[in-house]
Image (tube, rainbow, N blue to C red):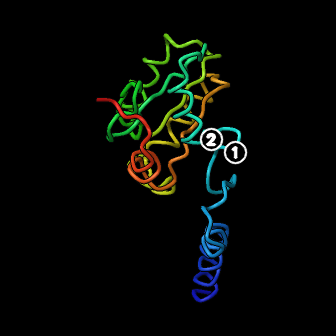
Amino acid sequence: MKKLMISFLFCLLALAAAPQVHAQALGGTPQLSKQAYPWTSKDIMDPAKLAQLLQDKNQKNDPLILNIGFVNNIKGAVGVGASSNEEGLAALQNYLKKVPKDKMVVFYCGCCPYDKCPNVRPAFALLKQQGYKNARLLDLPVNLKTNWISKGYPMAE
C-alpha cells in the first residue's frame, strides 16, 4: 500500500510538471494553462505593448500600472506593496476603491518567475473578484530586470 501511494504521488508530480517541461524542452516559455496559472493569454500584457502605450503621447486612456511587489517602479506605476498577505491585499483593495471598473489596470510584481511569485495570483484573484474586466498581468515570466529593464523600457526616476 505504501509503494502504491508513493507511486501515485510521483505520477501526480510528473503530470503537474509536464506542460512546463515540454515547453522548456522546445526552447519556449511555459504555456499558460489553467492548471499552472489562473489567467488566460487574454489577461496578459506584453511588455513591448505597455512600453509603447507609455511612449504614446496621444494615448487617451492611459492604463493604471500597479506594482504589487518589492521591485522598482516602472515609469508611471503606483507601488501598492506586496499582495502576498492579508495586509497587502487590503491595501490593494483600498486603492482600487477609487479606480473605475472599466479602467485598464496593468499589474506586475517582477521579483521572480510566475510559478514562484507569491504576489501575482492573489492580486489577480482580487482584481477579478472586484469586477475589473480590463485587468492585465504584465508578462514578466523571469523577472523585471530580464523582461523589462534589460530591454530599455521606461523606469521611474
Q: Where's residue 72, x and y in %? A: 32, 38
For label 2, the residue is: 44
Residue at (59%, 80%) from the top-left corner? 10
The image quadrant of residue 43 is top right
Q: Secondary structure at mark 2?
A: strand
Q: Is residue 63 left or right of residue 154?
A: right
Q: Which mark is residue 136?
A: none
Dot 2 crowding, Cα within 10 Å, few <14, some 14–19, many 20+: some
Question: Could you tell me if the residues under marks 2 and 1 are in contact, i.e. CB atoms within 8 Å?
Answer: yes
Q: Residues within 10 Å of mark 1 (few under 14, many from 20)?
A: few
For mark 1, what is the residue? 41
Q: Quadrant of the C terminus?
A: top left
Residue 38 point in image, percent of width and height: 63, 46
Residue type pointed to by label 2:
Ile
Q: Secondary structure at mark 1?
A: helix
Instruction: Please give the count of numbered marks on the rendered protein.
Output: 2
Q: Amino acid at mark 1?
A: Ser
- Of residues 30 and 57, which is closer to you in this image? 57
- Quadrant, the N terminus: bottom right
Q: Residue furthest left?
A: 157
